[in-house]
Amino acid sequence: MMYNSYYRPSHTNIVLKLILINFAVFIIELFIPSGYMTYYFGLIPRLVIGKYYYWQVFTYMFLHGGWMHIFFNMFALYIFGIEIEYYWGSKKFLEYYLICGLGAGIISLLTYYNSPIPIIGASGAIYGVMLAYGLLFPERYLYLYFFIPIKAKYLVIMFVIFEFFAGISGGGDHVAHFAHLGGLLTGFIYLKWPLIKSKLHIRKSVIGGNRNKWKDNYDEYDSEVDRILKKASVYGVDSLTPDEIETLRKARNK
């Protein structure tokens, strides 16, 4: 079911805690000698690869470069995150947020593998959250620049196109566009993993010599299994009923 109106729960534990943690780290940055936090906890590809500062792939997402930087990131996290946390639950939302941030960091590391320029900010994780919002609530209207109404699914598409061309153009805007794309890509794989895993299983069954056996049984489960997999990819595995889980189990065995 897709919501057609906004719902703002009275509290969301993880989103508010993430916002508080980010602001707390930012305040610490203000009192630490300039560059210290960025050097040791920002994502500097050359240090990660050359000096094995592997923790930077995680810690970079809690640092920010200024008041405007942290304000807009936390504002986006609040706007998009609280409804998703309410819908998914705190545990799944935190897992998704951190995985998107890590994925964005790893893709940035691979893209800028010899760069001495630090990458900081929660943008990669937040772009993953925005993607989830667009998939969960595609028909929801948002206001671009606070006054231009646009459906969530189109807004996400616009962001993907913009970040892709901005990334390949190599412009000097000092923005890690591939970190944003990394968060989007990681989020997409996470959300679509049940469907991807099923397709891989089907392919393995065919390659393994079970082509005829699978074909004999696939037609019976085709439409129902596809429906359940689509539901799981959009709403999460937790949304499946016991009967739907049993149907997937039977289809997998066949």
Image (tube, helix red, strand yellow):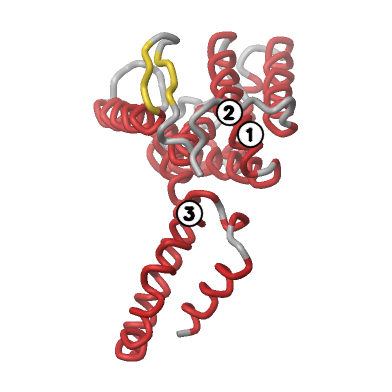
Dots 2 and 1: beta carbons under 8 Å? Answer: yes
Name the residue carrying label 2.
42
242 relative to 96, above or below = below
Please indicate whether residue 72 sits to the left or right of residue 13 in the image.
left
Front disc: 3 or 1: 3
For residue 39, the mark is none
Q: State which tag comes first along the sequence, 2 or 1.
A: 2
- Is disc 3 surrounded by few (<14), some (14 to 19) or many (20+) residues within 10 Å? many
222 relative to 172, above or below = below
Q: Position of residue 48 (x, y in %)?
A: 54, 40
Helix or strand or loop: what does disc 1 sit on?
Answer: helix
Front disc: 3 or 2: 3
Q: State which tag comes first along the sequence, 3 or 2.
A: 2
Name the residue carrying label 1.
59
Helix or strand or loop: what does disc 3 sit on?
Answer: helix
Callout 1, which amino acid? Thr
Please indicate whether residue 45 sits to the left or right of residue 210 in the image.
right
Decide which of 169, 125 is in the foreground and name it.
125
Name the residue carrying label 3.
233
Please indicate whether residue 188 sits to the left or right of residue 171 in the image.
right
Q: State which tag comes first along the sequence, 3 or 1.
A: 1
Mark 2 to mark 1 CA distance (whole Å): 7 Å
Residue at point 73% right, 10% down? 31
Callout 2, which amino acid? Gly
